[in-house]
Image (cartoon, grey):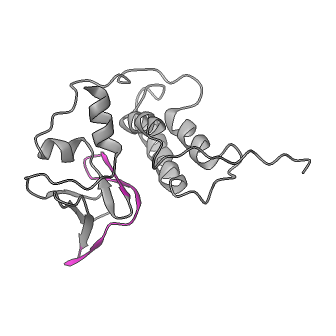
Amino acid sequence: MKRLILLILFIPAVFSVSAADWSSQLQGGGTVSVDPNTNRATVTRGGVTTQLWDGAHRLQDGSIIITNRGVAIPNESILESRQLQPPETEEWEGVRIVGTSPCERLVRSVCGDNNQCSDAEACNPSRQLLDMETEERNASTNRGLMTYTSGQCLKALKESEFFARCPKAPVSATQ
């Protein structure tokens, strides 16, 4: 069941669901909406609606929405609005971070150990997730525990279509 939920969370596929549009407030202002039939994400600010740019976006409630080519990757809130229930607890909840965090590992995996894949499509969203994880950990009373974004990065590490591993070998200092 958890594998099915992970696939639903990270496959930016277009699928039809008979549900109302999902919407939420962006932390920086504006209302983001996701069409239930296409998963197209738009943002409305000052009465003007445009496509939500690709990347990771923090919502006012602290959750995150990720867009790829204008398509939202359904998060837990979107799935709930479509009456799909996420698991009651996540395997990472309450887990202590030892060594590098999941988002640090994601950035290294996608962007490369020495930033050699910084032009990869998923590199910037990976860095945005790392920034969000850092903010959450800094705001926490226990900075050593996994955050919501840490859990999202764990899922992203398993999703290889969008968050593909950097195929380039690190450039050595002697070359």
Is residue 58 found left or right of 81 in the rendered image? Answer: right
Above/below status of 95 relative to 106: above
Q: Is residue 148 above or below residue 66?
A: above
Residue 160 place in picture, x, y as percent: 48, 42
The residue depicted at 47 percent of the width and 29 percent of the height is 143
* Horizontal relation, residue 116 to residue 60: left or right: right
**Residue in front for this viewpoint, 153 or 29:** 153
Q: Quadrant of residue 25?
A: bottom left
| 66 part of magenta stretch | yes
Residue at the image point whose x is 36% and y is 36% from the top: 148
In front here: 150 or 46?
150
- Residue 111 in the image: x percent, y percent? 61, 49
**Taking 140 as reference, is 123 above or below it?**
below
Asked if the magenta segment contains residue 46, the reply would be yes
Residue farthest toward the right in the current orientation of the protein = 174
Give the residues in magenta. Answer: 45-67
Query: Could you tell me which residue is drawn at 40 percent across and 29 percent down?
Result: 141
In the rendered structure, the answer to whether residue 168 lies left or right of residue 171 reads: left
Residue for point 68% across, 51% down: 115
Q: Residue 44: x, y in percent?
A: 23, 71
Image side of residue 87 versus residue 114, left or right = left
Viewer-proximal residue among 46 and 35:
35
Q: Quadrant of residue 135?
A: top left
Q: Measured from the top left, where is residue 72 in percent x and y?
A: 30, 56
Residue 147's place in the image compared with 162, above or below, is: above
**Residue 87: quarter of image:** top left
Figure quadrant of the N terminus: top left
